[in-house]
Image (cartoon, helix red, strand yellow):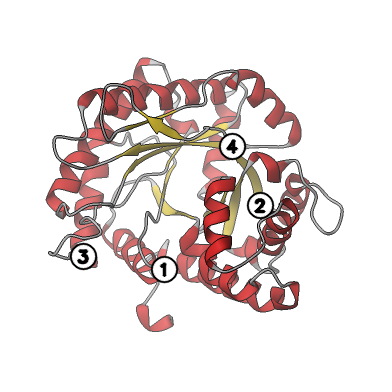
């Protein structure tokens, strides 16, 4: 483990106002999105779609890294390069999703535990040899009646810490993603309470395993009301709650925080990030690591037809540009 290398990679991941493109959808998630748009579901279409994303001409101006799925990191782009080679040549760091998904948490109804620690050390060595510079592991926390339980938060936090330790051992930066889901009717106060407790629990577990804070990136949810909560919150309220929560829990030597979009609309994800940056007075860089909120409109334009490739790429590049502005507090809804 080399602390300097880890910090250099983590710092580069959040440099300037660049963000991270999450394009690591599982086969199941990809199938749902393709089915909705009547795109044929097969390996070549998944490869072709992701080639469209990474080959967007101006992407490297706004994107520092791309999170890949296991299938993608082993595939080649249209020019014959592997995806990691192609990304490196564009100045975008390749990363890899390494968890195997959130599964039912035994003896805890309606809660999930993320799996994937089995053979992770060997897999991480393999991913490093292929070219991965960073990795990602997502924990899922649900707000509901009498949940989340402390057991769920501690167990998921410990798994995140074990994963982070395995990453850092081989100089791969772990993106640590403790997602409190938007699903539900809870208000912003409840989201704050749960997010605050989850982040506190997470950093306790990271500390127990001697994780180097300067060599990680945190990928949290913003503090928002539930998706079906009747009482909506303004961007200012979301920003204030989110920054307060981070200030309570995140060590100052963490280089950066890259928010997930978590079901927000494209515009809300950009606008909320913008307000967060306007009021943040902490040392970390606050940026984005969006999947659907960067890709969805581009996918709709592409439709599985490479005749639409250039137009789809323009849509992706504009979305990345707008989020880059938001990461420096310079976005405005009128730019849409």
Residue at image position (60%, 76%) is 301
Judged from the image, the secondary structure of the residue bearing numbered disc 4 is strand
Residue at image position (79%, 55%) is 77
In space, the residues marked 4 and 2 are separated at their CA atoms by 12 Å
Please rate how many residues cluster around mark 2, counting C-alpha atoms within 10 Å: few if below 14, some from 14 to 19, many from 20.
Answer: many
Badges 1 and 4: C-beta atoms under 8 Å apart?
Answer: no
**Would you say 119 lies left or right of 180 here?**
right
Nearest to viewer (mark 1 / mark 4): 1
Q: How many marks?
A: 4
The residue labelled by disc 2 is 92
Give the farthest residue toward the bottom.
Answer: 334
Give the quadrant of the N terminus: top right
The residue labelled by disc 3 is 236
For marks 1 and 4 on the same chain, the one whose residue lies earlier in the sequence: 4
Judged from the image, the secondary structure of the residue bearing numbered disc 3 is helix
For marks 4 and 2 on the same chain, the one whose residue lies earlier in the sequence: 2
In space, the residues marked 2 and 3 are separated at their CA atoms by 32 Å
Please rate how many residues cluster around mark 4, counting C-alpha atoms within 10 Å: few if below 14, some from 14 to 19, many from 20.
Answer: many
The residue labelled by disc 4 is 134
In space, the residues marked 1 and 2 are separated at their CA atoms by 22 Å
Please rate how many residues cluster around mark 3, counting C-alpha atoms within 10 Å: few if below 14, some from 14 to 19, many from 20.
Answer: some
The residue labelled by disc 1 is 266
| Residue 65: percent from left, percent from top | 60, 50
In space, the residues marked 1 and 3 are separated at their CA atoms by 17 Å
| Residue 198: percent from left, percent from top | 26, 34
For marks 1 and 2 on the same chain, the one whose residue lies earlier in the sequence: 2
Q: Is residue 237 above or below residue 243?
A: below
Residue at image position (77%, 46%) is 75
Badges 1 and 3: C-beta atoms under 8 Å apart?
Answer: no
């Amino acid at each position: 483990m080399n602390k300097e290398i880890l910090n250099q990679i983590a710092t580069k991941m959040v440099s300037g106002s660049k963000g991270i493109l999450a394009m690591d959808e599982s086969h199941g998630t990809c199938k749902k999105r393709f089915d909705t748009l009547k795109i044929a579901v097969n390996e070549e279409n998944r490869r072709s779609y992701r080639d469209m994303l990474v080959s967007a001409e101006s992407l490297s101006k706004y994107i520092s890294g791309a999170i890949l799925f296991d299938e993608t990191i082993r595939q080649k782009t249209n020019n014959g390069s592997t995806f990691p080679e192609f990304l490196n040549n564009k100045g975008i760091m390749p990363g890899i999703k390494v968890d195997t998904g959130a599964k039912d948490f035994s003896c805890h109804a309606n809660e999930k535990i993320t799996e994937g620690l089995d053979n992770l050390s060997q897999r991480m060595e393999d991913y490093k040899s292929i070219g991965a510079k960073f990795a990602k592991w997502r924990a899922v926390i649900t707000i509901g009646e009498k949940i989340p339980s402390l057991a769920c938060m501690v167990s998921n936090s410990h798994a995140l810490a074990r994963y982070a330790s395995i990453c850092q051992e081989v100089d791969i930066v772990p993106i640590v993603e403790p997602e409190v889901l938007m699903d539900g009717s809870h208000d912003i106060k409840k989201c704050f309470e749960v997010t605050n407790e989850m982040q506190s629990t997470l950093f306790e577990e990271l500390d127990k395993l001697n994780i180097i804070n300067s060599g990680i990136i945190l990928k949290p949810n913003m503090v928002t009301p539930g998706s079906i909560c009747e009482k909506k919150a303004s961007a200012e309220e979301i920003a204030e709650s989110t920054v307060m929560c981070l200030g309570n829990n995140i060590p100052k030597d963490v280089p950066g925080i890259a928010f997930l979009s978590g079901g927000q609309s494209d515009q809300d994800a950009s606008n909320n990030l913008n307000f967060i940056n306007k009021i943040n007075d902490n040392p970390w860089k606050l940026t984005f690591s969006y999947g659907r909120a960067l890709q969805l409109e581009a996918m709709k334009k592409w439709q599985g037809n490479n005749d639409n490739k250039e137009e789809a790429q323009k849509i992706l590049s504009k979305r990345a540009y707008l989020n880059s502005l938001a990461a420096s507090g310079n976005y405005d809804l009128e730019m849409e």
